Image (cartoon, rainbow, N blue to C red):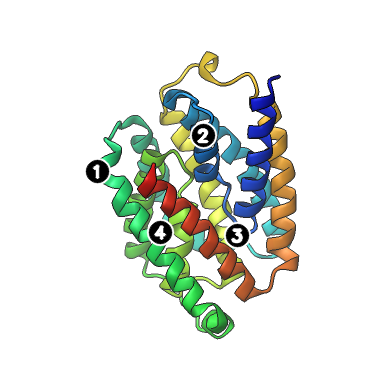
């Protein structure tokens, strides 16, 4: 095990803790960390998705135990996102076509959450269910984005749920964790890779990601107040959006 593997493991732990505090699994953070150490693109995406599955599984369990998983809300988004994520994993798209646009959307969402964080508890009291056809269509688009970017799609779902008023802040975290889990599995299935391409340090990084996930989900389910969750989500979106634009 090299020093670089250990340092990368530390970065993965930090990313997992930060992202899982808002129901995300950290794929965009893992991809950024791996890029810093020069991992090959064909290795990065499946490795990030594998770590995503670990952290998202933990997130689903902990948010569900805390009563913050609204699976009836999840179903229409997941039904269309799963096949779309599989298709997205099969497609190779030049990053210049979608990265700037996706990055701009994430940064706009971050600005919205900072601006409205102090009013978030009032907004949570006015939650309404999305129209079923709109949820199905949104799930397909988000799933495709998840497969294309090598993420679980929660980075796109959480802002949509909160901006549209379709979920309370804590419930959005639980729904995002489950959405990320199913799409990460579908995206990994659609990604063409061999076991030999996965880095030898992946078990170490998996342990680091799980430890970070324990810390982050503790913050998200019990410690952070609702405005704090929105500020944390804004930070996550700035990191992810900046990576999309600058990578």
Question: Neighbour class for label 1 at 10 Å: few (<14), some, many (≥20)?
Answer: few
Q: For residue 168, what is the image quadrant?
A: bottom right
Sequence-wise, the earlier of marks 2 and 4 is: 2
| Image quadrant containing the C terminus | top left
Q: Position of residue 210 (x, y in %)?
A: 71, 41
Q: Which mark is residue 106?
A: 4
Q: CA distance from mark 1 to mark 2?
A: 22 Å
Sequence-wise, the earlier of marks 1 and 4 is: 1
| Left or right of 194 on screen, residue 94 | left
Q: Position of residue 121 (x, y in %)?
A: 59, 82
Helix, strand or loop at label 2? It is helix
Q: Which mark is residue 22?
A: 3
Contact, mark 1 vs mark 3 (Cβ under 8 Å): no
Residue at image mark 2: 36
Q: Position of residue 120 (x, y in %)?
A: 55, 79
Instruction: Name the residue rendered at 28%, 46% in the picture.
Output: 98
Residue at image mark 1: 97
Contact, mark 1 vs mark 2 (Cβ under 8 Å): no
């Amino acid at each position: 095990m090299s020093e670089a593997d250990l340092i990368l493991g530390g970065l993965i732990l930090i990313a997992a803790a930060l992202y899982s505090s808002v129901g995300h699994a950290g794929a965009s953070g893992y991809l950024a960390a791996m890029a810093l150490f020069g991992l090959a693109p064909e290795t990065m995406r499946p490795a990030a998705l594998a770590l995503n599955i670990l952290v998202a599984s933990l997130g689903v369990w902990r948010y569900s135990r805390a009563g913050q998983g609204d699976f009836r809300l999840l179903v229409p988004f997941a039904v269309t996102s799963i096949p779309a994520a599989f298709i997205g994993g099969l497609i190779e798209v030049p990053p210049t076509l979608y990265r700037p646009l996706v990055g701009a959307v994430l940064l706009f969402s971050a600005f919205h959450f900072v601006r409205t964080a102090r009013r978030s508890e009032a907004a949570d009291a006015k939650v309404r269910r999305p129209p079923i056809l709109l949820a199905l269509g949104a799930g397909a688009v988000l799933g495709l984005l998840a497969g294309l970017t090598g993420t679980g799609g929660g980075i796109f779902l959480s802002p949509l749920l909160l901006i549209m008023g379709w979920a309370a802040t804590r419930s959005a975290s639980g729904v995002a964790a489950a959405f990320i889990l199913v799409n990460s599995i579908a995206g990994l299935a659609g990604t063409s890779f061999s076991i030999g391409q996965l880095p030898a340090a992946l078990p170490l990084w998996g342990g680091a990601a799980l430890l970070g996930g324990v810390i982050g989900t503790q913050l998200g389910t019990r410690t952070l107040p609702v405005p704090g969750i929105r500020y944390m989500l804004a930070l996550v979106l700035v990191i992810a959006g900046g990576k999309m634009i600058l990578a």
